[in-house]
Amino acid sequence: MSQDLLNFIFIGLSFGLYIFIAVASRASSTKEYYTAGGGVSPFANGMATAADWMSAATFISMAGTVAISGYDASRFLMGWTGGFVLLTVLMVPYLRKFGKPTVPDFIGDRYYSKLARGVAVVCAIFICMTYIMGQMRGVGVVFSQLFGIKIQSGVLVGASIVFFYAGLGGMKGITYTQVAQYCVMAFAYTIPAIFIAIALTNNFVPQLGLIGDFTLEGAKIPFLEKINNINTELGFSEFTAGKMDKVNMFCITAALMCGTAGLPHVIVRFFTVKNVASVRKSACWTLLFISVIYLTAPAIGAFSRVNLISKLHNTSYQEAPSWFQEFESTGQMAWVDKNGDGMIQYFGPGKSDTGSNDVFVGKGPMYPADDAPASQLRGEYGERLLANKADVTNPNELWFGNDIMVMANPQMAGLPKWVVALLMAGCIAAALSTAAGLLLVLSTSISHDLMKKIVKPSLSDKEEVNYARAASFVALAVAAYFGINPPSAFIAKTVAFAFGLAASSFFPTLLMGIFSKRVNKQGAVSGMLCGIVFTISYIIYFQFLGGTASQYLFGITPEGIGFVGMLINFAVTFLVSALTPPPPVEIQRMVAGIHLPGSSDLSMDDSSESEERVSGVGGEGI
C-alpha cells in the first residue's frame, strides 16, 4: 500500500470521527455553545484541555526548534509548562468561583465598566487572531505535504474544516472532539519517538534514550556527546550549549509563562466542569496529559537533528533519499549547489571553506551566487533564494524550516509507512484542536461580550449563537490570510507573539482583579491599553516595518517583549488606581468572597445569599 493511500486512510478516519462527534454533540443552547453545559467530567476535560493547549506550535514546531536551537529552545518548554502551573494555581479556581466563563465578562464585572469590557474584547481579538495565525500555518504545512500542494491551498482546506465542526458544535462539540484529537496526538507523537529511540539508542523510552548511549554505529557513546560532536564538526555550537543572551532568554520564558496564565481559550475550558473541586481535578489530569508530549519533545528534536545530518550531509543529490525530493516539491526544504559538485553540504558558521563566518543555516535566508543557474535551485525556496543577492562566502547548501522536522523525522529514520500516516493525522489534530478553541473564544468575545453585553442587550439566545457563527467565519477568513502570509517564518515564534500580548494585557489585569480589592476600573483600563499597545507596537515595528536587531530594547526580541509590556501594565495600573477613587464596596466584598472556602459563583448578578456570605469582610487586600 502506498504512503499517500495510508495517509488518506488515517486522516480520513480521524476526520470522520471528529465530524461525527461534532454532529452528535452539537450545541442546542448558548450555555452548551459557550461552556458545553458545564457537565463535562474532569478526566474528559483534562484530555480536551491538553488537546486545546498542544497546538501546532507544540506538536509541529517546538521539537523542530529544539532540533535547530538545542538548549535555547528550552524557553518554550519552560515557559509553556510553567505557565500552565501559574494558570491552575493563581487564576482558574478564583475565576471559576466568580462564575464568568469569558475573560472580558470577568473584567467587565470585576471592574464595573463597559469600557473595561470593550478593551478586554479588543485584547482578546488581538491575542486569539495572532495565535490562530500560527495554527492555520500549521494546518497549511501539513496539508501541503499530505496532498503535494502549496501551503496557501493547505491553509484554505484546513480553515474550511475548522469552521464546519467548530461553528456547528460550539464548546460542547469541540470538547468531545478534542478528546478524540488528544488520543490521536498522543499516539502520533510517542510511537515514532519510541521507534527512533530504539534505532539510535537501543532504548524504547525516548527520554532515557536522550540521556543514554548512542548505539547505532556499534561503539557506545553518550547520545548528547554524539550530537555535540556532530554539531561542532560541522561548525555549529554544541547542541547542549546556551547561545541566546540570558536577559532575552529570561524575558521570552517569562512572557510565555505569564501569557499562558492569561490565555482566554484555556481559561474558558475550566467552566465546562461542574464545580471548583472538579476544576482542580481537571487541572491535574491536564498536566498529566500535557507531560506525555512535552517530555518527549526534546528527544524528538535531538533525534531528528542526528537523522537529518546523517542522511543528507555530504550525500550526492542523485542518491538523496526520496523523502528529500518530496519535501523540496512542497517548499519545505531547498538545496543550492553552490560549488557545482552535486553534493548536499550542510555547514555552520564555524565551518567555512573560505573562512567566512557570515553564514545563515537552517533558519534564515541563504544567499546563492548571482550567477547560480536555475538548475542548481530546487523547490519554492530555492527560487526565492535566487532572487536574493549573493553571498558567495556562504558554504551552506541546505535549507529547511523548523516546522518540517517533526513530520520529516519518521521518514528520515525509515519507519514503517503506517507510522508516517499516524504522525500526519496527529499533526492535523494538533492544529485543528487549538484553532477550534481559539475560534470559539473569538466568536464568543464578539457575540456575547460585545454584541450582547454592550451593543444590543436584547439579543435572544438564537441570535447570539448566529452572531457567534458569523463572527467565526470572518475571524477564520482573516486568520487564513495571515496563515498564508504569517508574521514570522515559523509557527512557534508566531504563537509566542500571542503569548506576549496575553502577558502584557490580561495576566496583570486578571491577577490584580483576583487578589487586590484596591485596583479600580481606571487603573485596569489604563494598564491594559498601555501594556498591549506597547507590546503590539514593538512587534509590528520589528516584524513588519524594518526594525533591526541593533535597535532591540535591552536586546529583547519581539518574542520576549510581552514581559516588559506586562511590567508596564502592572506599574500603570497600580499608579492610576492609587490616584483615583477605590472600587465600590460591593466590588471589594465580591473580591474578598472568592477567597473564602466554600464560596462559589460570586458574580455581580448572584443572589443576596452570596452577598450576605461575604458581607463584613474588610481589609484592602494585596
Image (spheres, grey):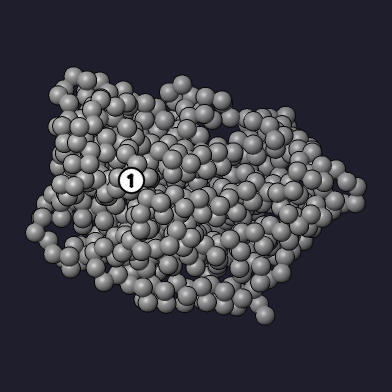
Quadrant of the rendering where the C terminus is positioned: top left
Q: Nearer the viewer, residue 29 or 241?
A: 29
Residue 240 place in picture, x, y as percent: 70, 35
Dot 1 corresponds to which residue? 598
Q: Is residue 121 above or below residue 543?
A: below
Q: Nearer the viewer, residue 31 or 96?
A: 96
* Residue 205: % across, % down: 73, 54
The answer to whether residue 130 shows anywhere in this view is: no
Q: Is residue 348 above or below residue 56?
A: above
Q: Left or right: where does residue 173 sit relative to residue 282?
A: left
* Residue at 55% in and 66% down: 184
> What residue is rendered at 50% in x and 46% in y?
492
Whether residue 499 sits left or right of residue 475 in the image: it is right
Secondary structure of the residue carrying tag 1 is: loop
For label 1, count other residues whose C-alpha is less than 10 Å away and answer few (under 14), some (14-19) or many (20+).
few
Q: Residue at x 49, y 68 (%)?
A: 180
Q: Is residue 222 left or right of residue 613?
A: right
Q: Position of residue 380 (x, y in %)?
A: 54, 56
Q: Amino acid at mark 1?
A: Gly
